[in-house]
Amino acid sequence: MAEDLGLYVPPAARIGDPLQRVGTPSLVLDLDAFEFNIERMAALAAAHGIALRPHAKAHKSTAIAAAQLAAGAVGVCCQKLSEVYPFVRQGIRDIHLSNEVVGADKMAMAAELARHARLSICADHVAQIDALGAAAAQAGTRITVLPEVDIGQGRCGVTGSDELMALVERIARYGSLRFGGLQAYHGGIQHLATWNERRDAALRSAEKAAQHVRHLEARGIACSVVTGGGTGTVEFDVESGVFTEVQPGSYVFMDGHYGSNEWGGTLKLQHSLFIATTVMSTAKHGMAVCDVGLKGVAVDSGLPRVRPGDDDALRYTAANDEHGILRIADGDEDDGDVRDRLGERLMLIPGHCDPTANLYRQYVCYRGDTVEALWDIDASGLSR
Ligand code: PLP
Ligand code: MN
């Protein structure tokens, strides 16, 4: 055994610290903007009498889920069973897994979780239902199953009404299962750039969900829940007359990609999530190198943007593992001499919040210029 040297990485931030002193890279949360977003989405759902079940995969944090519940959310969605554990441990007991699961290890997890929470899970094959039914029966618990219908994404979910009926009938065979309604989500339309394109696509998808509901109703089966929708379509989904519940996730943060789209409604969400970074090398003319690269920001939906007003001459142009390349815009008054920018601190707006949050273990939450709270990202990395 090596000697314990008491040698630990110092914390990036302490409550009460000035924001300027937070160690970088850090994932930071502007609490004013965050609270604004939480309130706006809660008010939108409440105004339409629609249940709000935010997707926790966006933030993976029980502290944020607690804030959403305090604002009126009925529960949360998770995408993976392992992700559910920290939420249940923290007392969040109404969780919808908006996804399919297969395999003995998953069934054991589902049955265990269902003993502690009101758990619902999606299915699009009778074999998933058989496995869930057997696992729940063996554990002496009950799992709610929501068949997933494909409303245009072309990923998971059944398309035909006979296929759907077969799933509903299969669920009814098991005393350990309960038919909970329908999961109907189209991720591909969430990021359509213009408001009108998004509205038309959302209406088409909602109509597909409505057809399934009508078909089941004609056979005497009521769908008490139709759940779906994300940040991009939520304003249309709450008015659709089909969805009883919406499951937006990214709205709490409003990432760069969502922010670049057109918002024609009243929601007007604000960027609340940033990555604090420092320029740590200026050795090359016309280029500043910062300490946030691929390990500090997801780039699948575009490179991060420097927050407007921080240093408008710098543009983030490439991400290496731990280096971010910032190019100086043509026509900058310093003519490409960046040396005086060494040590400059910037806030980056991540292109895609979900995979970015999953890279960190805590949110450094600030109000104004001061660190107010440190929130664990307790489901970070949990993707089984
Ligand atoms: N519901 C499901 C099933 C999802 O997969 C997602 C995200 O991909 C969401 C809801 C939330 O979407 P968003 O973060 O765009 O609001
Ligand atoms: Mn996303």
Image (tube, grey):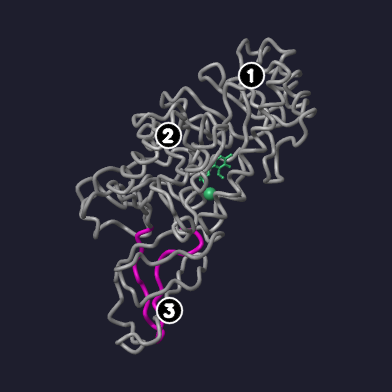
The residue at the point 27 percent across, 42 percent down is 373
Q: Are marks 3 and 2 in contact (CB under 8 Å)?
A: no
Decide if residue 356 is on the left or right side of residue 202.
left
Q: Position of residue 297 (x, y in %)?
A: 47, 58
Residue where numbered disc 3 is placed: 327
Decide if residue 162 is on the left or right side of residue 255.
right
Dot placed on the residue nearer the N-terminal end, 2 or 1? 2
Q: Amino acid at mark 2?
A: Ala
- The CA span between labels 3 and 1 is 58 Å
Residue where numbered disc 2 is placed: 45
Which element carries disc 1, helix, strand or loop? loop
Residue where numbered disc 1 is placed: 222
Tell me the crowding category of disc 1: few under 14, some 14 to 19, or many 20 or more residues within 10 angstroms, Cα based: some
Count of number-bearing discs: 3
Dot placed on the residue nearer the N-terminal end, 3 or 2? 2
Dot placed on the residue nearer the N-terminal end, 3 or 1? 1
Decide if residue 361 is on the left or right side of residue 208.
left
The residue at the point 52 percent across, 39 percent down is 237
Which element carries disc 2, helix, strand or loop? helix
Q: Position of residue 192 (x, y in %)?
A: 56, 56
Q: Which residues are magenta?
A: 275-297
The residue at the point 55 percent across, 54 percent down is 191
Q: Are marks 2 and 1 in contact (CB under 8 Å)?
A: no
Q: Identify which residue, 308 or 107, lies in the foreground.
A: 308
Q: Amino acid at mark 3?
A: Arg
Tell me the crowding category of disc 2: few under 14, some 14 to 19, or many 20 or more residues within 10 angstroms, Cα based: many
